[in-house]
Amino acid sequence: MSASIGFVGLGTMGLPMASNLARAGFAVKGFDLSASATEALVEAGGTSAASAAEAARDAGFVITMLPTAKHIEAALFNAGGIAETIAQDAIFINMSTILPEETDRIASALGERNIAMIDAPVGRSAIEAARGALLILASGAPEAMKRAQSVFDVMGNQTIDCGALGNGSRVKVINNFMGVSLNALTAEALTLAEASGLDIRLALEVMRGTIAGIGHMRVTYPNKVLKGDLIAGFPVDLAHKDLGLALQLAAQVNVPIYMGSAAAQTYSIVRASGRGRQDYTAVYPVLRELAGLPEEIPYDASGDVEYNPFASDK
Amino acid sequence: MSASIGFVGLGTMGLPMASNLARAGFAVKGFDLSASATEALVEAGGTSAASAAEAARDAGFVITMLPTAKHIEAALFNAGGIAETIAQDAIFINMSTILPEETDRIASALGERNIAMIDAPVGRSAIEAARGALLILASGAPEAMKRAQSVFDVMGNQTIDCGALGNGSRVKVINNFMGVSLNALTAEALTLAEASGLDIRLALEVMRGTIAGIGHMRVTYPNKVLKGDLIAGFPVDLAHKDLGLALQLAAQVNVPIYMGSAAAQTYSIVRASGRGRQDYTAVYPVLRELAGLPEEIPYDASGDVEYNPFASDK
Amino acid sequence: MSASIGFVGLGTMGLPMASNLARAGFAVKGFDLSASATEALVEAGGTSAASAAEAARDAGFVITMLPTAKHIEAALFNAGGIAETIAQDAIFINMSTILPEETDRIASALGERNIAMIDAPVGRSAIEAARGALLILASGAPEAMKRAQSVFDVMGNQTIDCGALGNGSRVKVINNFMGVSLNALTAEALTLAEASGLDIRLALEVMRGTIAGIGHMRVTYPNKVLKGDLIAGFPVDLAHKDLGLALQLAAQVNVPIYMGSAAAQTYSIVRASGRGRQDYTAVYPVLRELAGLPEEIPYDASGDVEYNPFASDK
Amino acid sequence: MSASIGFVGLGTMGLPMASNLARAGFAVKGFDLSASATEALVEAGGTSAASAAEAARDAGFVITMLPTAKHIEAALFNAGGIAETIAQDAIFINMSTILPEETDRIASALGERNIAMIDAPVGRSAIEAARGALLILASGAPEAMKRAQSVFDVMGNQTIDCGALGNGSRVKVINNFMGVSLNALTAEALTLAEASGLDIRLALEVMRGTIAGIGHMRVTYPNKVLKGDLIAGFPVDLAHKDLGLALQLAAQVNVPIYMGSAAAQTYSIVRASGRGRQDYTAVYPVLRELAGLPEEIPYDASGDVEYNPFASDK
């Protein structure tokens, strides 16, 4: 197997990723419609290919980092595409974020041609791409994953094995759903703080010291609902009341809090289901029920270590 | 001034708070409509009062921990209320969460009677109340705040001085808005993960290592928008695209993601305003603009220390 | 009983209402904090009162049309208020829109003083107030309602008897909830039409000829779900798919459709509950279930006449 | 040109449409994967085709009524597809609802083969399909539209010429967006009514007599904002207040009103933009602005006739 790499798509993320590979000693042949992008790769020590097919020829790994599934399918299967030249023992690695069903469709088309695929979208941003500090959410056959690890180790500082092919895309979509939505929610909270007459720095400092800034994933969820404990640390009724106060305050100062107002409605559902005195993490089983999922949460908490960020020596 | 404390409202939060004060040596006289609650306080070393007025008599501090502003106003000004007996040099401390305007109204009524007030709602939950590990969001005149510190030190392990009277309530509402809404958003993400076929633990582990789980308040906001830097680490256009993928995925698996779908609309506004290529934290100035706030963000980033949770030794 | 009327609150709505009463021959004594408002009433043939108490003295009916419940309670019970002078056989009529629980509270306070009350908020706008063409949503004891009818007939052209005292406020809040929300939804649809390249007039003309413009209350609901018929005229699955298309279109042209995107999530819940092939009016029983209402819809359709706006002679 | 028709897709809508054409004397050759569907067409007087290509052979019109654009493209361009046999002077008519961009893509592919296309999605439901009373939203070249009119006249009782090819799809998506979302909003209002203790029939009767049930498209929009008149009939501030009351009521009775709560946030934006005293139809120009549309609404109201459903003889 050759240690050379074909890299298709040298944009905001792709260029620093490919450049890092070239600097680390891989023979990187890059293809992009933008001449300045391929030139930048050449400066970093790579070479320029005239087509996706040429980039893929004789490569041990062929990586795509492109905007949408349509671009990837075109780069693979159109005339001058990767499928024309990729070697039978090469591994195709898509690192773009696309829908799980699109990943499945591409994997199926490649499977018919006996080409191995890894689905490896990345977390974090262009800053981490430049630093080689991406989070890589890889999924695929274990043997292929093992071979690709040295490539991932250059582009990222953390690779998570997400299991069967397609799970990388699933995790990526969920992860970005959360991060991107949380950004908008954060903007709602800070705008409401300012419009209410608060100093932004004060609001930030307080929230950094509570669940508001720390989040539920390391604290309330593992300590409460995921352990099956819904005895109220903070009851649904109170959460519902507090959102009501926030909605009234926001209405007074004309701050649109679309996400917060949606959250308030969800808590109304939780109360209507008779869970008003349970812990407010009961919102999770209720939402699962709305989505038609089976009652029992498929999570084994037995190995979890308790984490309490508010511990005190007193 | 007496070091005795009148405590009105011995519920889920009030009882452990008052009990901790009694155990720490304060003379605590408690009043609650529930006899079992006052009995529990007596067991912890306090005494039982027959009315709010009696609890307040001769006390140096009179604390209320009650469900709503109406309860507080009744406890203060109705027949048998605190206002009948509270000493001129005592400090009234409301620790319940109420609307800022309600705090202002109560403060104004007390001001007419020359009674000093501190507005000090608490963060965290009943667990921390029992441990004396509450977060206390205090606001009021500096001299009163100084006197009350020894009382706060028993109930909490962190007191934040929020400035002028009323700001405690403001911070509290904002903080709970964020924490309670974030809970519902977290439930959306985990439900979407499971319905998409992912292992919950895997989804949690990945998100704990990215902004999705770490939040924006310590990372993206201080490093980007609050410094006035909107050069895209992660561009709005991509955030908008990724939410679109999540909405399609959620529709396929019938998971209701009301908050995420609202966030997607907000990013549409950000794009329509011509900011598609800016960093996705540009959602914050856009939301400020929608709320009619002045263009410049009143935040001085000059003293901020950069924090990068994804740093790498490579 | 005197046929004179005390009228408190001469604003956008109150002034034309009181003026119409004066022109119709009632002796109207008006009170408002604005001198220009009372002067305008005098020009219409009324007289000016120096206080709410004075307006109410010797009146057979005392009407309030004020911004909030606090204003009404102050006008009634503060010094110089209506309660000081209102006759035992007079009827107090509140025509302002307030919360049902606030109506109940005021009714209870008046009941203790043996003063009869009618709750009669109005529908439509200032244009109809000037024309005497308001919709009056009256509730109260039948005998009082009967006496007040001649007064209502001057201000409105339709009075609906909403039953027991307090129901007028309930109907009013629901009615305005629907009309005001529908306005925002209409704006979403027309903005999406224009941004998609459509002529606004064309979009309006098409929608006026379909359920989109005609609404569900006279067509789909009585013909389907309220009759217990959920055989799909238009199935949930298709409604869900069509909203998905609209969400994608809106994202492409950057039109924020917050309400439509929330609706899409609700249809996901309907599908997850196993009702995908039912008529899309199945969204109603699902929402009732989320609110914790009993399964059977308390509506007897037996007397309903079928209405089909799309009938054809063919 | 032959008057025979090839019909591909005999589902809930397609079967009654094709059957009506057969009964009206057209020679209809139908194709569907379901044998029972083609048999039903044969009973109505049509014939069964073994493939889409066979259905299209020698037909003057080839109609598709299929679930998604992918199905249509497969029916056209896969092996055994319509494109293999369709005559040069035939007209291809897609009556399925798909995205405008998908219509454009199909039209472009057919254009390369010199095949004329009409985009003609339908409004209303299976009931109207059976009655030949569909609303047909046709767009395409005038000459093709003229030829197809006799076909449309059998399937529907109203054909609207939506202009250039692709506009039919645009209108359809907008129209269904509105009708389907309005269904969910109607369910919110009726659920809130019932949970508040109101009789459903009373709530319906009242709303049918106000804008809540009549809608804005024939009344407020042409009479106010579309004429450039934003003098308050019903001011934004009051609309915002009334939604606030509804949100509080809904929270008390635990009814989730996601759409209404989103609407409330939109009115906050309208107020923050300084339009609080304008007519509540000002929500429309504000939403247009959020979507980045130019300030002036491209609508000429000069020919509009005033419509007032609340007119009175008094």
Image (cartoon, coloured by chain):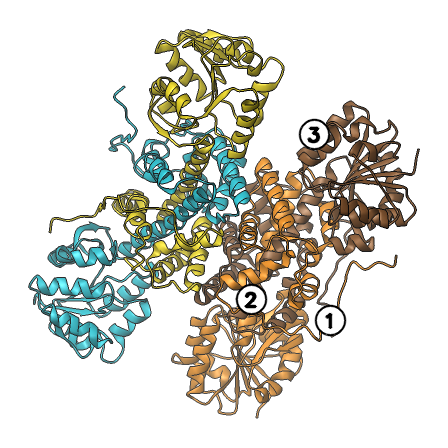
Chain colours: A brown, B orange, C cyan, D yellow
Q: Distance between the residues labelled 1 and 3?
A: 52 Å
Q: What residue type is labelled 3?
A: Arg
Q: Residue D314: percent from the left, percent from the top?
A: 11, 51
Q: Is mark 3 on a helix, strand or loop?
A: helix
Q: How far apart are marks 3 and 2 (CA)?
A: 45 Å
Q: Is residue C168 left or right of residue B278?
A: left
Q: In which quarter of the image is residue C68?
A: bottom left
Pointer 3 local density, CA inside 10 Å: few below 14, some 14–19, many at least 20: some
**Residue drawn at 78 percent across, 48 percent down:** A15
On the image, numbered disc 3 is attached to which residue? Answer: A105
Question: Going from the N terminus, do you reach mark 1 or mark 3 first?
Answer: 3
The answer to whether residue B111 is seen in the rendering is yes
Labels 2, 1: one chain:
no
On the image, numbered disc 2 is attached to which residue? Answer: B174
**Residue drawn at 85 percent across, 46 percent down:** A42
Report in which chain the residue with disc 1 lies: A
On the image, numbered disc 1 is attached to which residue? Answer: A312
Q: Residue D163: percent from the left, percent from the top?
A: 40, 32
Report in which chain the residue with disc 3 lies: A
Could you say which is closer to the camera, residue B215 or residue D145?
A: D145
Q: In which quarter of the image is residue C150?
A: bottom left
Q: Which amino acid does label 2 sit on?
A: Ile
Pointer 2 local density, CA inside 10 Å: few below 14, some 14–19, many at least 20: many
Q: In the image, which is nearer the foreground, mark 1 or mark 3?
A: 3
